[in-house]
Amino acid sequence: MNNATPQPTADLDAGLANLREYGYTIHPGFIDGHRLVQLRERLLEQADMERELGLANGGLSISDPIGTGSGLSPVQLVDLLPNKGRVFVDLFMHPLMHAYYGGLFDGVAGNLTTQTGIIVRTGAREMVTHADTQAWSFRTPVPVMLNIIVCLTDFRADMGATRILPRSHRREAPRLGLDREGRVAALEDLGSMVPAEADAGSAILWEGRTWHCQAASTSGRVRLSVGHTFALHFVKPQELYATSLHDEVYASLGDDELRLLGFEVAQEYAGAGHPGGTRPAGPSALA
């Protein structure tokens, strides 16, 4: 990488420094080989089952089916992963995830707002360049969201690796609805977007104000990952675990796991996050 992009690092402090300076970082060796195999097998098993049942989620703008030659959609999302295997719960409880969002958020309480399996095949088109906080009517002065993508296969440019604009977290977000020509013009004075290339087992992290997009996939290979978004406690989650978590999964989780999924009353923030009557008293009522 050149001096306009961060060096991949497995050092937490250096990774946090990259996030603050560039808006993203790459952490090699985030998970070991055994866990990598477990996650990959379970994700593919679940994806196959959802396709067979007619429940497969093709995503939004990234799922334009232009033909893969296999009869499969170019993109398949497997959402609500905490309901779909203990291996996914163990992943979002990874100590490094907690260290990164805790460090970036400066110790302010946060939650997991989504955990999604992402399968990208040849034929997937480039996603619209965006920042995850761009729908808000104001620019936040501090990070409020953190994405952590755990790579279950290699991420290469021709496999649709995420493209990121370094240091764009310090600028205004791209306008909603901006067409491709407008986005290219807007990027002219900002430098070039770069592919976040990484080996299987790595993690790619970027904060919510950073401009990014999924690139087009032309390689003939399948790209697998598990995406996580962590956000400060006041941000509405993408997946409402308080209403969607299966009862048997809820009963199997420990207090720390439930807290991260939003089953917590944050008394230091005027009782924010009270779950009301959606769950019985117990871990969900922890202050």
Image: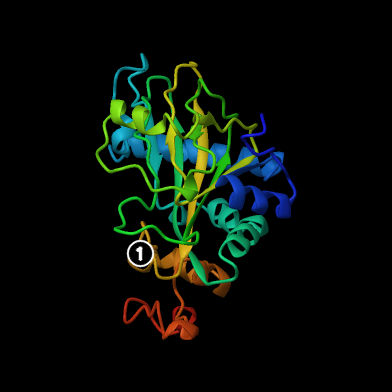
**Depicted 42 relative to depicted 182: above or below:** below
Q: Nearer the viewer, residue 126 or 243?
A: 126
Q: Position of residue 111 (x, y in %)?
A: 48, 65
For disc 1, the marked residue is: 236
- The residue at the far top in this view is 69
Position of 70 with respect to 104 (left or right) is: left
Within the image, what quadrant is residue 218 found in? top left
Q: Nearer the viewer, residue 62 or 25?
A: 25
Position of 93 with respect to 80 (left or right) is: right
Within the image, what quadrant is residue 234 found in? bottom left
Q: Which residue is drawn at the image coordinates 36% and 27% (left, top)? A: 184
Within the image, what quadrant is residue 215 found in? top left
Q: Quadrant of the N terminus?
A: top right
Q: Position of residue 78 (x, y in %)?
A: 40, 43
Q: Nearer the viewer, residue 84 or 132?
A: 132
**Depicted 251 relative to depicted 71: above or below:** below
Crowding at dot 1, Cα within 10 Å, few <14 / some 14-19 / many 20+, comes out as few
Tell me which colouring the rendered structure shows: rainbow
Q: Position of residue 170 (x, y in %)?
A: 49, 50
- Amino acid type, mark 1: Lys
- The residue at the far right in this view is 11
**SS state under label 1:** loop
Q: Which residue is drawn at the image coordinates 62% and 32% (left, top)? A: 198
Q: Which residue is drawn at the image coordinates 71% and 53% (left, top)? A: 12
Number of residue marks: 1
Q: Position of residue 67 (x, y in %)?
A: 31, 17
Position of 53 with respect to 200 (left or right) is: left
